[in-house]
Image (cartoon, rainbow, N blue to C red):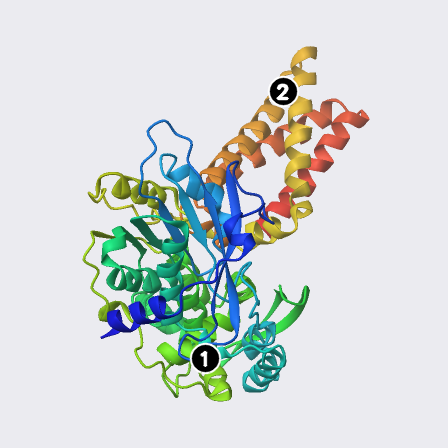
Amino acid sequence: MFIRVVLALALSAPPVVTPDQADPGPCQVPVPAGTVCGFLEVPERRDSPGRTIQVAYAVRHSLAPGRRPDPVVFMGGTPAIPLMKELAGMFPERDVVAVDQRGGGASQPGVACPETAQALLGRLRVPPSDVGAAAVRCRDRLAAQGVDLRGYRTGEMVADVVALRGLLGYDAWNLVGAGHAARVMAAVAAADPAGTRSVVLEEPPEDPGAEPARLGDAYERAVARLNARPARVTALDPLLGREFAARVSGHDLTALLGAAPRDAGTPSLVDALAQGREELLRPLVERLGEELAGRASGPYHAVRCQDAPPPAGSPLFTVSGDQAVCDAWNLPRAPEPVTLASTAPAAPVHVLPAAFPGDACARRAAAAFVADLRPAGPCPGARPVELHVTAAPYAIAHTPWLAAPFGLFALACLIQLVTAALKGRALPAYGGLAGVAFAGLTGQSVYELAKEPGGALTVGVPAITEWYASLAVVSTALTVAALLHNRRWPQTTAAAISGVFLVWWFTWFL
């Protein structure tokens, strides 16, 4: 039934080809050479034609000698066109088409709803923000602009993609979907089987409580502790650009963990929270804020409320916030709600980890599958890492000058090593060498952790860093010993820098 409805929508209201579409022009964001951008003009509501909207797309035409005739079309949960560079690198022998969802990215009109995004994060404030009131303000503002939120649902997006293939003149293409668009692309394959060669989908997100449930006793203790005495956390609101005081309960922790990507550092984080290390909640709060800031919140909630309304009565503020938006907007249920279970693509399908297209392995797997329609081996998850839990790396990542003591210590040790070696002074030379070795080994271990999938570095540093610190202690001891033999200002400065660094390292960083 759904397939017939989508085909009828796409065929009964053919796109209006504007001059911009017939002769696409330059893009408004950085894209690879050979890329042009345009708009697909479609009815805002195909069941009630009249007002039209523009769906933004970009096409990178491949100039490879072995160019394949079937392109790749990508739609994501966030704007797709800015990802054209990564997509073009994945599929050099194929044309690549990136499509922004209607209402999001460069599509017109933009159906952004910063009011609800800000209010959802504001559910952690004291007192909490009123999401329903924010949703009403957004709805009224969009309505004054002529926007009909009933036109922003999965079925309409599916029909947009089907219509775009006809506009661009491709006989068949390979569908790639991430985020909510994974559901869109699965439905496109079911609605347009003749035009679909293959389908690559990002793994759908799990239930918000599923990930925490696997964390065992430490998670239960952390939730119980925070429910008994909620934490007060200072965090940055990316939408307002200033810090605010968040209140985080145990139920809020569940919501924050459910909203965060799978992370190698999550078990260590939960263990530390169970022990009362509440300063580590800041990365979780800010990551949620960044996700809300980057989300096309208007289309997201319009789709959610019409296709898959959230359950009522959830204790999770993210779910109850979505419910408040749906209650305020009071949109009718979609006549044919689209779920992955309701679509059955006939074309070969490959499901990728929920890290696409950011993860390099997921990109390679997608490219390999589109090339020969055979799934590649599974991508490894985040490598288990033994961590020393500390909030310092996260703070440094956002305020780099906080790492000044480390950089100054490393520089002082290097200068001490070189000058003492040239003058034949063994004691300060060995002191400088120990400090340089500490800085190098620590920097290398942190760099390797930063390359791992997930965000373990936001939780701590490799546990071996604690052992490397013994080299810094040795370096300081040798430097102070050298000072007893040479009380000139260079040695005094080196000893002072080393002493200050050790205090910083053991009292703040670790």
Q: Can the viewer see residue 263?
A: no
Question: Where is mark 1, residue-wise?
Answer: 150
Dot 2 crowding, Cα within 10 Å, few <14, some 14–19, many 20+: many
Instruction: From the viewer's side, name the closer residue of 1 and 180.
Output: 1
Q: Is residue 152 visible?
A: yes
Label 2 is placed on what type of residue? Answer: Ala
The residue identified by callout 2 is 429
Quadrant of the rendered image containing residue 490: top right
Q: Residue at x 60, y 76 (%)?
A: 115
Name which residue type carries label 1.
Arg
For this view, does 464 lie left or right of residue 213? Answer: right
Distance of mark 1 from mark 2, alpha carbons?
73 Å
Q: Is residue 428 above or below residue 81?
A: above
Callout in the foreground (1, 2): 1
Callout 1 secondary element? helix
The percent position of residue 378, horizontal first and vertical second, equals: 24, 46
- Mark 1 or 2 closer to N-term? 1
Q: Residue at x 39, y 52 (%)?
A: 74
Residue 375, relative to residue 266: is it above or below? above
Tell me the SS state at disc 2: helix
Q: Nearer the viewer, residue 40 or 352?
A: 40
Residue drawn where x is 33% and y is 40% of the image: 364
